[in-house]
């Protein structure tokens, strides 16, 4: 068992994944290699990332606590690494965890509009072409 897995198991005895995620802030003064290692560890532990969105070319993982972590992946690179039962690429800006989806409503031209938790600062829609896949994902 790797060191981080042992640490994670010990932490899980006392804390929820959300509490662990909140405590794992990434300092800004880390080297690129340290930041990559921290990002990889966060991804492998499967901490409950709810959505990733792009802003100014940066991808953020937003946690249930509303804390955001910059990660060194594009959404295109991150998407295949996430479990498809839990994460869905809603559009070019957002990959969401199934637990983040609070409501789904019909929108214009066959699209869907979603309410996510925590809520992003913009409307999140699913295109007409992706709407059936999204509905199947929610139901499956």
Image (spheres, helix red, strand yellow):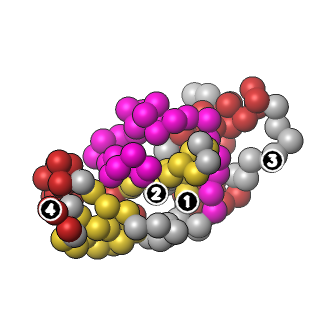
106 sits left or right of 120 in the view: left
Which mark sits nearer the N-terminus, 2 or 4? Answer: 2
Image quadrant where one finds the N terminus: top right
Examine the rendered structure and indicate whether residue 114 appears above or below residue 94: below
Q: Whole-Å distance between the Cαs marked 1 and 4?
A: 30 Å
Examine the rendered structure and indicate whether residue 30 appears above or below residue 122: above
**Residue 109 in sight from this viewpoint:** yes
Q: Whole-Å distance between the Cαs marked 3 and 4?
A: 43 Å
Instruction: Look at the numbered disc 4 and give the secondary structure of its residue.
Output: helix
| Residue lying at 46% horizontally and 55% vertically, measured from the top left | 51
118 sits left or right of 98 in the view: right
Instruction: Look at the numbered disc 3 and give the secondary structure of its residue.
Output: loop
Q: Residue 80: name its quadrant.
A: top left
Which residue is under mark 4? Answer: 110
User: Which label belongs to residue 27?
Assistant: 3
* Residues shaded magenta: 67-95
Task: Give the foreground label among 1 and 4.
Answer: 4
Q: Whole-Å distance between the Cαs marked 2 and 4?
A: 25 Å
Task: Give the foreground label among 2 and 4.
Answer: 4
Task: Give the foreground label among 3 and 4.
Answer: 4
Which residue is under mark 2? Answer: 50
Which mark sits nearer the N-terminus, 3 or 2? Answer: 3
Which residue is under mark 1? Answer: 63
Which mark sits nearer the N-terminus, 3 or 4? Answer: 3
């Amino acid at each position: 068992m790797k060191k981080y897995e042992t640490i994670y198991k010990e932490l899980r005895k006392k804390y929820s994944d959300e509490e662990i995620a909140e405590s794992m802030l990434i300092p800004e003064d880390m080297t690129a290699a340290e930041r990559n290692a921290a990002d990889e560890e966060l991804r492998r532990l499967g901490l409950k990332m709810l959505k990733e969105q792009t802003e100014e070319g940066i991808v953020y993982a937003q946690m249930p606590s509303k804390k955001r972590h910059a990660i060194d992946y594009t959404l295109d690179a991150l998407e295949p690494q996430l479990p498809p039962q839990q994460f869905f690429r809603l559009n070019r800006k957002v990959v969401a965890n199934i637990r983040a989806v609070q409501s789904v409503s019909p929108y214009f031209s066959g699209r869907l509009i979603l309410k996510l938790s925590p809520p992003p600062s913009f409307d999140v829609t699913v295109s007409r072409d992706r709407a059936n896949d999204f509905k199947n994902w929610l139901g499956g």
